[in-house]
Image (tube, rainbow, N blue to C red):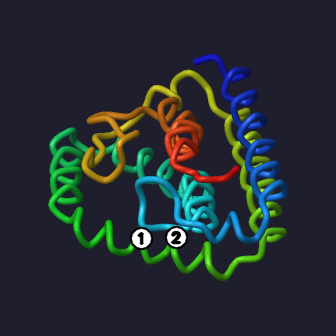
Amino acid sequence: MDKQAVHDDYERTRTAFRALLDGAADEELGRRSNGTRWTNRQLLFHMLLGFLIMRALLALARIMARLPAGVGRGWARLLNAGTKPFDAVNFAGSWLGGSLMPRRAMIVLCDRTIAALHRRLDRENDISLAKGMPYPTRWDPCFREFMTAADLYRFPVRHFDFHREQLSLN
């Protein structure tokens, strides 16, 4: 894994997130996004959420990597079976966070979260980056059937770029 490329992608994304929030008028942020039920502001919060969940995803991958492979596959199947409740919580959380969190707070949270991911990535080694687990592919278009820690570090940028295409900002 090219750690520097991941660091560069984090910085590109952090800069883009700030520019999107700073450059949009309130009216634009309140406009419906393309292909989602969220406004642009709510979708931006959802894009930030992709970074916020990284601590949990990495911790879960470390735990599952220690268990027999069948446990991880069963866990992924169980999560896939719970896609509808997950979708409801995912929608509501992004709707609520994007509706209530001020722009400045979203930017600060993004900056702090990405800074923490930079530090965490720097502490990883090839062995820890190779560990992974099966994932519920129905939960997110960026999830694959099996993801290593290296894949997870790339996930929030892929998630961000995927949803950036859905923004309806000028």
Instruction: Identify which residue, 91 or 123, lies in the foreground.
Output: 91
Q: Nearer the viewer, residue 135 or 65?
A: 135
Gap in angstroms between the C-alphas marked 1 and 2: 5 Å
> How many residues crowd mark 2 within 10 Å: few (<14), some (14–19), many (20+)?
many
Q: In this view of the protein, which residue sits in the foreground, 113 or 59?
A: 113
Label 1's element?
helix
- Amino acid found under the numbered disc labelled 1: Phe
The disc label shown at residue 114, or none: none
Seen at 70% across and 49% down, the residue is: 170
In the rendering, at what x and y percent does residue 148 appear? 42, 32
Determine whether, in the image, residue 100 is placed left or right of residue 87. Answer: right
Q: Which residue is mark 2?
A: 94
**Image-quadrant location for residue 75:** bottom left
Q: Give the x, y percent position of residue 40.
A: 60, 62
Kind of residue at disc 2 = Ser
Q: Is residue 32 above or below residue 96?
A: above
Task: State the residue at coordinates (79%, 64%).
Answer: 25
Kindly identify which residue carries mark 1: 91
**Image-based side of 69 in relation to 150, left or right:** left
Q: Residue at x 59, y 38 (%)?
A: 157
Disc 2 secondary structure class? helix
Q: How many marks?
A: 2
Q: Is residue 170 above or below residue 25?
A: above
Q: Nearer the viewer, residue 30 or 136?
A: 30
Q: Quadrant of the N terminus?
A: top right
Q: Residues within 10 Å of mark 1 (few under 14, many from 20)?
A: some
The reply to whether callout 1 and callout 2 are in contact (CB within 8 Å) is yes
Residue 162, placed above or below residue 91: above
- Res 147 quadrant in image: top left
> Residue placed at 47% from the left, 52% from the top?
57
